[in-house]
Image: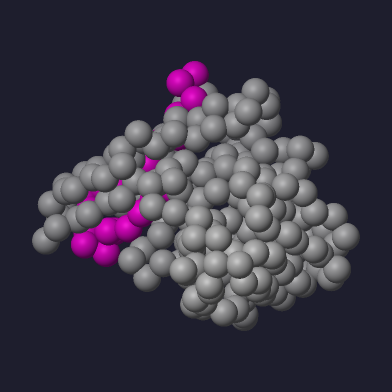
Amino acid sequence: AQKVTQAQTEISVVEKEDVTLDCVYETRDTTYYLFWYKQPPSGELVFLIRRNSFDEQNEISGRYSWNFQKSTSSFNFTITASQVVDSAVYFCALRTPYNQGGKLIFGQGTELSVKP
Amino acid sequence: NAGVTQTPKFQVLKTGQSMTLQCAQDMNHEYMSWYRQDPGMGLRLIHYSVGAGITDQGEVPNGYNVSRSTTEDFPLRLLSAAPSQTSVYFCASSRGQADSPLHFGNGTRLTVT
């Protein structure tokens, strides 16, 4: 069965600090897809990034970067020079192959609080 | 662009009442799904559909029914509401590929008293 674990329930940092959100996943599939979503206090779910299981290149987008390591089944998310607007709940998710239903399985989420 | 539209935004029910949460998308997405969000538990999949006429159960299907008669609509029915169904419900859709991200509606906050 597929599972996503975000061990950090809450993280609090001061503005301009770097912060890493951890995500560990379990799956027996050789092809799978990993996602990160952001849920700001307003409540909507915003897609941030997608990574395929066969693409282990790290990705950087502005202050955001993602480190995907199949050897440790991890897909960690780093925010550099955090800002108050980064305060949100962040979800890591694993999507099963479409011929198995294409279900998106979420971790429990990490609530990030960035204080000025 | 409307995207995924959920109605109502808020609802209060008494135990035993029934209701339907509506979900519509205008992106011609094959895949649609319903999640519930509870504190500390992330989002849990209730039901999903890979196309019109096809539905299947997710992690927490008990107490909920769905149908998919059109590509655009995927209503979620609570047949006899229970306090344990108090939650925030999200509908989501995507193209029919597993690498396609889900697009979410803005959610329905349901309280069952």
The residue sitting at 60% across, 31% down in the picture is A2
Q: Is residue B73 visible?
A: yes
> Is A59 placed above or below B47 here?
above
Q: Is residue B104 visible?
A: no
> Is B93 placed above or below B48 here?
below
**In the depicted view, which residue is nearer to us: B63 or B15?**
B15
**In the depicted view, which residue is nearer to us: B42 or A26?**
B42
Give the magenta part as a residue range: A71-91
Q: Quadrant of residue B49?
A: bottom right
**In the displayed structure image, the side of residue A9 where residue A69 appears, left or right:** right
The residue sitting at 31% across, 42% down in the picture is A9
Q: Position of residue A73 (x, y in %)?
A: 49, 25
Q: Position of residue B36 (x, y in %)?
A: 54, 56
> Is A34 placed above or below A43 here?
above
Residue furthest out toward the front: B16
Q: Position of residue A88 (x, y in %)?
A: 32, 58
Q: Quadrant of residue A1?
A: top right
The residue sitting at 37% across, 41% down in the picture is A77
